[in-house]
Image: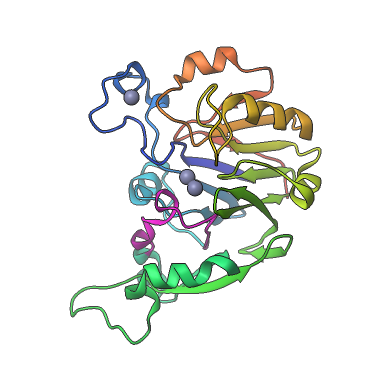
Amino acid sequence: MRLHFLGTGTSFGVPVIGCRCVVCKSEDPRNQRSRHCLALESAGRVLLVDTPPELRLQLVRAGIPSIDAAFLSHLHADHVHGIDDLRVFSIRREAPVPMYVAAEHVRELETRFTYIFDESLEPNPGTSAPEIDLNTFTAGEQLSIAGFRLQVLAFPHGKVNSYGFRIGGLGVVVDGKAILGESRAALEGVETLVINALWWGDPHPTHFNVEEAVAVAGELGARRTYLTHLTHRLDYSELLTKLPQGVRPAYDGLVVELGDG
Ligand SMILES: [Zn+2]
Ligand SMILES: [Zn+2]
Ligand SMILES: [Zn+2]
């Protein structure tokens, strides 16, 4: 299985519009972070995790010509508002794109994107909306999506849950502030952990900071950990030198080869 980090930035992205800080002005491409997106690829099939605003650019850049399904971690705008870029897939395949969303989020998704999900609304002549086949999940559920077997995990993220998963030796914690209960048990001993981290210091109410993410990765016994959802307070090279062994920052375009499963 191959893991593509398509977007590794926090909700503002990096560079932040108009920001003159060292990281935003940096020429290191690893400091240029679009909004959160992952793709899992195995046996020629692709599962997309989130549909952020830069989705088209991310897929074009990564050379991923098609996807088989999309999993939405939660509905914050930085994770969902590129949903229209799925149009190309439903048009090409002449079939809806399977999408998986938490049962507790589905009503809000349908309300926010009525032009997609309200079947009584027809697109204007000459225009189109993505065709999506919505499926729901709940925490702890085992899902089989496009050949990938996932155990869905919930993580508290302010007023909502964010959903990630364990799939074979890979654990993904998209947004979130804590790993508790069943989610913690499911991630014990994970081979590769992907976890959000905003910056050093200043605990954030709904996200891990770097210290917290490193600590929880250690508690879980993760063999290697990739930090994502990074802000412009983190310079890639500097962060790399400060992180303990086995923990690295992710960057847009990073591809990691994983074992089977
Ligand atoms: Zn986010
Ligand atoms: Zn900046
Ligand atoms: Zn979020």
Q: Quadrant of residue 179?
A: top right
Q: Is residue 144 magenta?
A: no
79 vs 212, left or right, is: left
Pick the front one: 31 or 22: 22
For the point 72% across and 41% down, the residue is 259
Pinpoint residue 1: horizontal percent, then vertical percent: 64, 46
Say above or below: 82 vs 246.
below
Q: Position of residue 178 (x, y in %)?
A: 66, 41
Res 61 seen here: yes
Which contiguous range is marked in magenta? 69-86
Name the residue furthest left: 125
**Image side of residue 142 versus residue 87, left or right:** right
Q: Residue at x 80, y 40 (%)?
A: 188
**Residue 55 vertical position relative to residue 240 in the rendered view, above or below:** below
Residue 170 x %, y %:
69, 43
Q: Is residue 176 above or below residue 215?
A: below
Image region (quadrant) for ligand 2: top left
Above or below, 233 against 136 in this view is above
Task: Return the x and y of residue 168 as percentages of the image width and height.
Answer: 74, 48
**Is the image coloured rainbow, by chain, by secondary structure, or in one colour?**
rainbow
Residue 99 appears in the figure: no
Look at 37% across and 29% down and name the residue there.
32
Q: Residue at x 61, y 41 (%)?
A: 177
The one nearer the camera, 159 or 61, is 159
Q: How many marks?
A: 0
State the residue in front, 18 or 171: 18
